[in-house]
Amino acid sequence: MDLSSLKAPAGATKKRKRVGRGDASGHGGTSGKGHKGQKARSGGHVRSGFEGGQMPMSRRLPKRGFRNPFRKSYVAVNLSDLCRLFEKGAVIDEAAILSSGMVKKKGEGIKILAKGNIDFPVTVKMAKISEAAKAKITAAGGSVEEVI
């Protein structure tokens, strides 16, 4: 058996619908577009949200809340995650976290949070770190530097 002899099982593949190819195609007459109207015409379509001239739902409903265009989103990294990936005396910064594969994209930045415990000293050089995480790292004998 080789790759050239492989075949999809019966019923797995289906021929595409070729419309506008005459009566013998099985889609003759109106070509599966029904009778007249905008959607039966060539290039005829209705944009999304259009309700035939009626006031669309998106405009009928009240607008609520506030969306801050300047909001920054940080990727949260817990102390328990750092314990798993780094050894005693390691220098932990954004580059080290990204290269470890813990965070795929840093987005606006990375913030260290205090969930979990750390029981060995490490040096953390980050722009964002919670006060509780700082306390736990320094209690374990490590140091924290805030980098801008």
Image: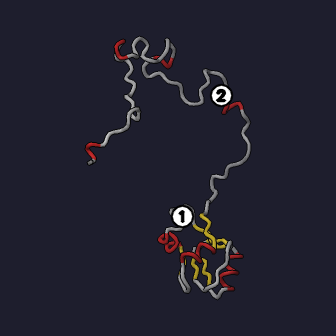
Q: CA distance from mark 2 to mark 1?
A: 39 Å
Q: Secondary structure at mark 2?
A: loop
Which of the 4 image quadrants contains residue 23? top left
Q: Nearer the viewer, residue 68 or 135?
A: 135
* Quarter that holds the C terminus: bottom right
What residue is drawn where x is 57% and y is 78%?
125
- Residue at the (62%, 60%) spot, across then down: 72
Which of the two residues, 35 or 51, is positioned nearer the viewer here? Answer: 35
Label 1 neighbour load within 10 Å: few <14, some 14-19, many 20+ = some
Q: Position of residue 1 (x, y in %)?
A: 27, 48
Where residue 105 sits in the image (x, y, percent)?
Answer: 51, 62
Residue 20 place in picture, x, y as percent: 37, 17
Residue 86 shows which numbered tag? none
Q: Is the residue 112 above or below the residue 108 in the image?
A: below
Q: Residue at x 41, y 35 (%)?
A: 12
Percent across and percent down for residue 49 are 60, 30
Residue 5, image quadrant: top left
Q: Amino acid at mark 1?
A: Lys
Q: For this view, does 3 lie left or right of residue 121?
A: left
Q: Based on the displayed image, in which of its 4 quarters is residue 117 positioned?
A: bottom right
Mark 2 neighbour density, 10 Å: few (under 14) some (14–19) many (20 or more) = few
Q: Which residue in the protein does label 1 denote?
A: 106
Q: Secondary structure at mark 1?
A: loop
Q: Residue 56, labelled with which disc?
A: 2
- Tell me which amino acid carries mark 2: Pro
Q: Give whichever of discs 2 and 1 has the lower sequence position.
A: 2
Q: Is residue 145 left or right of residue 136?
A: left
